Image (spheres, rainbow, N blue to C red):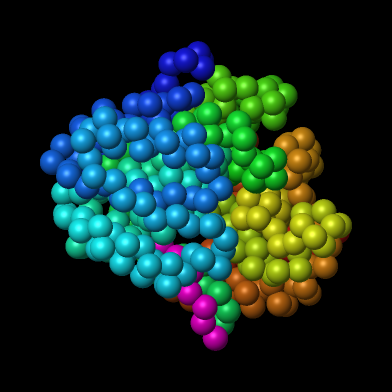
């Protein structure tokens, strides 16, 4: 794949159909994407992640002037606590102050937190206006920006409930400019690789049986952030996600496949990522875990669960090696006792009509949903990530 030529993945989700454009400097094409996807827009509201380099922000501003759009901006400093009702309200006020109409457009430039919040502001403002997602982290490129999930967390007496408020609101377009990955913090970049490993654990059933092997062969180039390799990495991951979403946009499948598969590792991850004391290494200064780091641990727990249930064998060690090569954690110190983790899982929104729902790998590139596995198997899975 040539770093100079962007690639395009078409996403078909319910009634929506849009392109994800991936490549170096593909934000240069935003002006033309705006003219195609929001031809009658007069205003655009840019929601900027404060961590994004000014050079990228200026590419978006240039697209506004090129398209004759009146641009306004909101800036967010992303952290899990800002993924909350007050930030959503603030965004809505900013957008209303900027007088956006239904035919106007929101642009999200940043990581998953900014994309999710801007996405829900777009879903809820005037009952829904278009959004163009311009993800700037690997995690947002391969996962959060594609598929239309938007929203934020709420704090309840059961603790923090992640993504409990939200809507499916498909973007009008996604532009994943891999130039944004060049300056990304190393830890943030590696955290995104956990979602790529996750996709490779289900990709054989969704059109890309070679993804895990290709990622293993390309480890050096991936970690060196070679633009052509990153373009291929993001393209293949988005293609897998798009194939899953096409079958089950709203995660309604009652079978053992469908969009729920994208939660592989996440039932465990959601239970541990809000434990503030956990660190990906022994260094308490690195606590808490990033989402991708918690997913990495969750993938190990899921593979252990698959082995406990007799659905897979010999899966945990190769997976552990793959994650370690990407600098991701596979065990963690200071994990609370398993009863507390089980209690946290019980409150996760993926506890489906009172049943616990896990996704387990059952073979290379193939995963399945299981309901209500025996509690001893889940406890063994939890213990497998205790350092
Ligand atoms: N990140 C999981 C999904 O989009 O369904």
Q: Which residue: 55% across, 19% down? A: 228
Q: In this view, does 246 lie above or below 277?
A: above
Q: Which residue: 70% across, 40% down? A: 186
In the rendered image, which quarter is residue 222 located in?
top right
- Quick one: 129 or 164, which is closer to the camera? 129
Left or right of residue 387: residue 163 = left
Residue 156: image x %, image y %?
A: 51, 82
Q: Which residue: 64% across, 78% down? A: 343
Residue 19: image x %, image y %?
A: 32, 33
Magenta-highlighted residues = 147-157
Residue 64 drawn in magenta: no
- Count of all numbered marks drawn on residues in the image: 0
Residue 263: image x %, image y %?
A: 53, 54
State the quadrant of the C terminus. bottom right
Q: In this view, does 321 lie above or below 127?
A: above
Q: Residue furthest bottom?
A: 157
Q: Residue furthest left?
A: 40
Residue 140: image x %, image y %?
A: 50, 45
Left or right of residue 80: residue 313 = right
- Main SS category, magenta section: strand
Q: In this view, does 146 lie above or below 8?
A: below
Left or right of residue 79: residue 15 = left
- Quick one: 301 or 62, which is closer to the camera? 62
In the rendered image, which quarter is residue 365 located in?
top right
The reply to whether residue 66 is visible in this rendering is yes
The reply to whether residue 314 is visible in this rendering is no
Q: Which residue: 70% across, 58% down? A: 289
In the rendered image, which quarter is residue 327 located in?
top right
């Amino acid at each position: 794949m040539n770093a100079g030529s962007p690639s395009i993945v078409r996403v078909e989700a319910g009634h929506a159909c849009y392109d994800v454009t991936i490549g170096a400097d593909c934000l240069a094409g935003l002006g033309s994407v705006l003219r195609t996807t929001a031809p009658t827009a007069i205003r655009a509201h840019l929601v900027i992640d404060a961590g994004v380099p000014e050079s990228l922000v200026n590419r978006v501003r240039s697209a506004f002037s090129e398209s004759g759009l009146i641009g306004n901006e909101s800036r967010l400093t992303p952290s899990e606590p800002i993924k909350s009702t007050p930030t959503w309200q603030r965004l809505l006020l900013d957008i209303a102050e900027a007088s956006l109409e239904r035919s106007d457009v929101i642009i999200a430039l940043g990581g998953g937190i900014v994309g999710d919040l801007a996405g829900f502001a777009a879903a809820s403002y005037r009952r829904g206006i278009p959004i163009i997602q311009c993800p700037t982290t690997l995690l947002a490129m391969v996962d959060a920006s594609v598929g239309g999930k938007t929203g934020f967390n709420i704090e309840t007496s059961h603790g923090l409930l992640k993504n409990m408020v939200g809507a499916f609101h498909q973007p009008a377009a996604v532009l994943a400019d891999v130039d944004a990955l060049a300056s990304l913090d190393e830890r943030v970049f590696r955290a995104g690789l956990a979602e790529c490993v996750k996709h490779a654990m289900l990709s054989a059933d969704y059109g890309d049986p070679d993804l895990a092997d290709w990622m293993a062969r390309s480890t050096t180039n991936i970690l060196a952030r070679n633009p052509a390799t990153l373009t291929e990495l993001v393209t293949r991951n988005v293609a897998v996600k798009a194939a899953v979403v096409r079958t089950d946009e709203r995660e309604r499948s009652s079978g053992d496949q469908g969009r729920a598969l994208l939660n592989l590792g996440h039932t465990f991850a959601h239970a541990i990522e809000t434990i503030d004391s956990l660190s990906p290494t022994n260094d308490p200064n690195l606590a808490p875990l990033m989402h991708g780091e918690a997913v990495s641990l969750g993938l190990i727990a899921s593979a252990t669960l698959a082995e406990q249930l007799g659905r897979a064998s010999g899966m945990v060690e190769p997976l552990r090696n793959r994650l370690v090569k990407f600098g991701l954690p596979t065990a963690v110190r200071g994990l609370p006792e398993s009863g507390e983790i089980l209690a946290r899982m019980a409150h996760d929104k993926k506890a489906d009509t009172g049943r616990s729902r896990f996704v387990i790998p059952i073979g290379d590139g193939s995963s399945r949903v299981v309901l209500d596995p025996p509690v001893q198997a889940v406890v063994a899975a939890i213990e497998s990530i205790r350092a």
